[in-house]
Image (tube, rainbow, N blue to C red):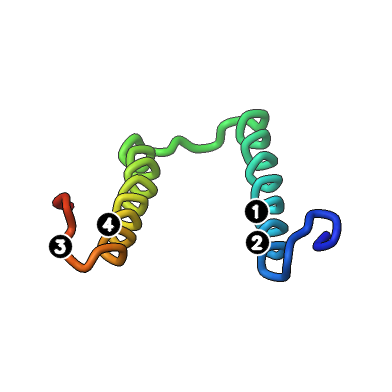
Amino acid sequence: MQEALGLMGDQATMLAITIALGVGGLAALFMALLWPKRWHLPYRMEVGFVVLPTSLDRCHRYVKASRRTSESIPYPL
């Protein structure tokens, strides 16, 4: 795979992991759509699944901005 895509060591590994997780995620999505419903996820947990990645992204941007500049963060968290 490294020679075919022009990727080196870690890049090829990360690409393989990404492809595997993507295929697994699509399989899980189709299984969730096609299999009969067995239980209901509470609305609070659905909101949590949206809030968690959003807050992680916000924290990542905050840390990235703080490393880029020597002064304080330009926007409050």
As rendered, which of 16 and 66 lies closer to the eye? 66
Q: Which mark is residue 5?
A: none
Q: Residues within 10 Å of mark 2 (few under 14, many from 20)?
A: few
Helix or strand or loop: what does disc 3 sit on?
Answer: loop
Instruction: Name the residue beneath numbered marker 2.
Output: 14
Q: Label 1 sits on what residue type?
A: Thr
Does residue 37 appear to the left or right of 16 in the view shown?
A: left
Query: How far apart are the two marked residues, 3 and 4, measured between alpha carbons?
Result: 11 Å
Instruction: Name the residue beneath numbered marker 3.
Output: 72
Instruction: Name the residue beneath numbered marker 1.
Output: 18
Whether label 2 touches label 1, CB < 8 Å:
yes
Helix or strand or loop: what does disc 1 sit on?
Answer: helix
Q: Quadrant of residue 15?
A: bottom right
Which residue is rendered at x = 35% and y = 57% of the image? 60
Q: Label 4 sits on what residue type?
A: Tyr
Instruction: Name the residue beneath numbered marker 4.
Output: 62
Q: Earlier in the sequence, mark 1 or mark 4?
A: 1
Query: How far apart are the two marked residues, 4 and 2, measured between alpha carbons?
Result: 24 Å
